Amino acid sequence: MPHCESAQTVKNGTVKLQDQSLQQRYLCQGCGKRFNERTKTPMSRLRTSAVVVAAAINVRTEGLGVCATGRSFGKAHSTIARWESRLAAQVSQWSPPAPGGTAVTVEGAEVPTRVGENLTPLGI
């Protein structure tokens, strides 16, 4: 829906996302603004497909760390964290509230460790 909430809209081209999928764009004939189905949602202005974002958030809820999720999906860990913060504002719409009196678990960032010396891998 456009910003003016007008029903006078027409298709107005497509945009190619990073995964090469196409996203339909629309034009409001009432106010002249362009928009797509993500406008006014937490997914607005993201160039990554919703399927990839949902999969990344899903593995995060399963316990995979931010850095490991970024490596797995070929994204920066800051991108994964940004997706989480965008979607966190919507958590009340898709997640039931936690029961009262429950403990809260806070996850720390992954800490790289080094054991012994840095050795060149064999065979190189």
Image (spheres, rainbow, N blue to C red):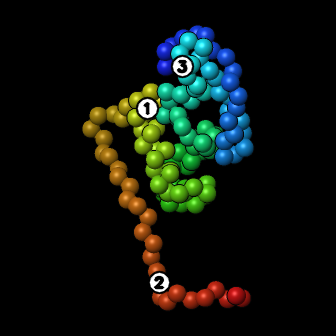
Q: Earlier in the sequence, mark 1 or mark 3?
A: 3
What percent of the width, then of the height, locates residue 28? 59, 17
Separation (CA) of disc 2 from disc 3: 56 Å
Amino acid on which the number 3 mark rests in the picture:
Pro
Query: What residue appears at the point 64 percent right and 86 percent down from the top-left corner?
Result: 121
Badge 2 is on which residue?
A: 115
**Pointers 2 and 1 in contact (CB under 8 A)?**
no
**Is residue 113 at least partly visible in the picture?**
yes
Q: What element carries label 1?
A: loop
Name the residue carrying label 3. Answer: 2
**Mark in the foreground, 2 or 3:** 3
* Rendered view: 82 above or below 117: above
What residue is pinned by disc 1?
90
Q: Nearer the viewer, residue 88 or 106?
A: 88
**Extreme residue in the front direction:** 32
Residue 60, percent across and down? Answer: 51, 49
In the picture, measured across the screen, residue 54 lies left or right of residue 104, that is right
- Few, some or many residues within 10 Å of mark 3 (<14, 14–19, 20+): many
